[in-house]
Image (tube, rainbow, N blue to C red):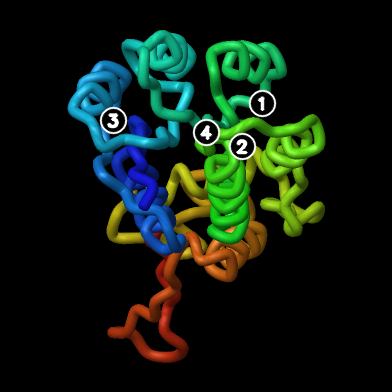
Amino acid sequence: MIGVLVVDDQPMVARVQAEMVDRVDGFRTVAVVHDGNAALVRVHQGDVDLVLLDLSMPGMGGLEVCRRLHALPDAPDVIVVTAVRDMAAVHTAVRHGAVLYLVKPFTFTTLRERLMQYATFRRTATERRSVDQREIDEALAALRTPVSTTSVPKTLSPESLDAVRAALADEPAGLTAAETAERTGMARVTARRYLDHLTVSGVCLREPVYGRTGRPLLRYRLR
């Protein structure tokens, strides 16, 4: 079983990631923390094989956490999970030991496939035996093979999807399409498209709200 530490300064987002991890065979969340210092403390306590690490956090940022983890004698592996779309950040993260870089938002399917890629790589990389060039290439290719599904359809904007997901994260009780539209500045119909995508992707739940005549309102909340 691969023990995973989830590091994200947004509690709701961190909880959703942890729930996703626990749905993947062979993985379990050992802890959830919300800042860089807490991440380092928890890693030193042990039982952490893999860190899902956000970059944009107050105080110690994710890249500094990555650098410090990489310097440890028995460092856990790191998958960066972030909304930062900056090739300089990608380069720095890889230089400090990150094995994968996953851009938010993403579906459960995308995260599961990335974790399974990592598990395949880990099984080979931890074997203490002599290997040839072909086996080395195959092990590294396991990390680089594209996932079979894209995280965001071409008809949707990743930035707008980020905004909708952030609005939901700020309201644990959930939001209607009209409330989401008001908070994000979108049209209600547009907000509804993004909310429905997150629902189909398994990221949020859609629940009817009764108590009024006519059709019930639909409220969306993160899982």
Q: Which residue is mark 4?
A: 128
Q: CA distance from mark 4 to mark 1?
A: 36 Å
- The answer to whether mark 1 and mark 2 are in CB contact below 8 A is yes
Q: Which residue is mark 1?
A: 85
Choose between 92 and 203: the one closer to the eye: 92
Q: Secondary structure at mark 3?
A: loop
Q: Position of residue 147 (x, y in %)?
A: 72, 52
Mark found first going from the N terminus, 1 or 2:
1
- Tag shown at residue 34: 3
- Tag shown at residue 103: 2
Q: Position of residue 162 (x, y in %)?
A: 56, 42
Q: Position of residue 50 (x, y in %)?
A: 41, 36
Q: Position of residue 137 (x, y in %)?
A: 78, 34
Left or right relative to 215: residue 156 = right
Residue type marked 4: Arg
Mark found first going from the N terminus, 4 or 1:
1
Numbered disc in front, either 4 or 3: 4
